[in-house]
């Protein structure tokens, strides 16, 4: 994530001073899945695919495939090989790691909340507009127009209310000074 930084990131930052206390060390668990096959197994499988004769139907030979197709073919074959030899297709390893988290404001969150807030204001304006349109249509006895305007008013009022609920759940967290 962009909040994980190293020394070079901090050295380039304008706020890189001890008094700012903008760095926090965080321990986290890294989980990685990898194949039990070794590099020699990989080379063997790839060599086998290179020299394998393909039937004369639409299939391409390994050397005629694009790089991504070759990678996919090796991956499938290596998975089958690992299943036969090692009785497993993947090994999972979990290790504790420690990284520095930058506590300065990340503009993505703030910009997203502001855009959400602005969209809510747009929906509020549209709600008022369609409410006035509904009243105008009711005065002039245009029932179809009044019904359409009422539907639009309800739609935009629901949208602005939904945006309000979502905003309330995020606003205090994101807009607080020093929040990530």
Image (cartoon, rainbow, N blue to C red):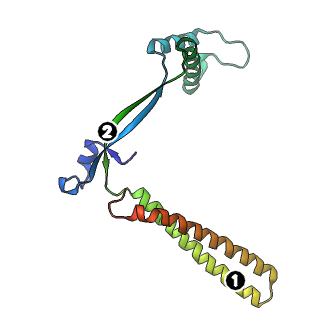
Check disc 2 and report its element: helix, strand or loop: strand
Query: In the image shown, does 5 or 162 lie closer to the viewer?
Result: 162
- The answer to whether the residues at label 1 and label 2 have Cβ atoms under 8 Å apart is no
The residue furthest bottom is 139
75 lies above or below 111:
above
Q: Position of residue 162 (x, y in %)?
A: 58, 66
Q: Residue at x 77, y 80 (%)?
A: 145
* Residue position marked by numbered label 2 in the rendering: 98
Seen in the image, is 100 located left or right of residue 82? left
53 lies above or below 148:
above
Q: Position of residue 125 (x, y in %)?
A: 58, 77
Seen in the image, is 160 located left or right of residue 16? right
* Residue position marked by numbered label 1 in the rendering: 133
Crowdedness near tag 1: few (<14), some (14–19) or many (≥20) residues, C-alpha within 10 Å: some
Q: Nearer the viewer, mark 1 or mark 2?
A: 2
Q: Position of residue 146 (x, y in %)?
A: 76, 81
Q: Residue at x 48, y 28 (%)?
A: 33
């Amino acid at each position: 994530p962009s909040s994980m930084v190293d020394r070079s990131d901090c050295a380039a930052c304008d706020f890189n001073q001890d008094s700012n206390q903008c760095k926090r060390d965080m321990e986290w668990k890294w989980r990685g899945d990898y194949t039990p096959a070794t590099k020699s197994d990989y080379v063997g499988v790839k060599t086998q695919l290179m020299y394998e004769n393909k039937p004369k139907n639409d299939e391409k030979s390994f050397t005629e495939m694009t790089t991504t197709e070759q990678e996919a073919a090796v991956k499938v074959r290596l998975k089958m090989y690992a299943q036969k030899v090692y009785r497993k297709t993947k090994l999972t390893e979990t290790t504790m790691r420690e990284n520095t988290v930058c506590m300065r404001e990340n503009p993505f969150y703030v910009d997203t909340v502001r855009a959400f807030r602005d969209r809510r204001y747009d929906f509020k304006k549209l709600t008022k507009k369609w409410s006035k349109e509904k009243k105008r249509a009711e005065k002039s006895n245009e029932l179809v127009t009044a019904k359409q305007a009422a539907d639009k008013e309800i739609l935009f009022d629901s949208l602005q209310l939904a945006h309000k609920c979502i905003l309330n759940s995020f606003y205090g967290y994101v807009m607080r000074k020093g929040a990530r």
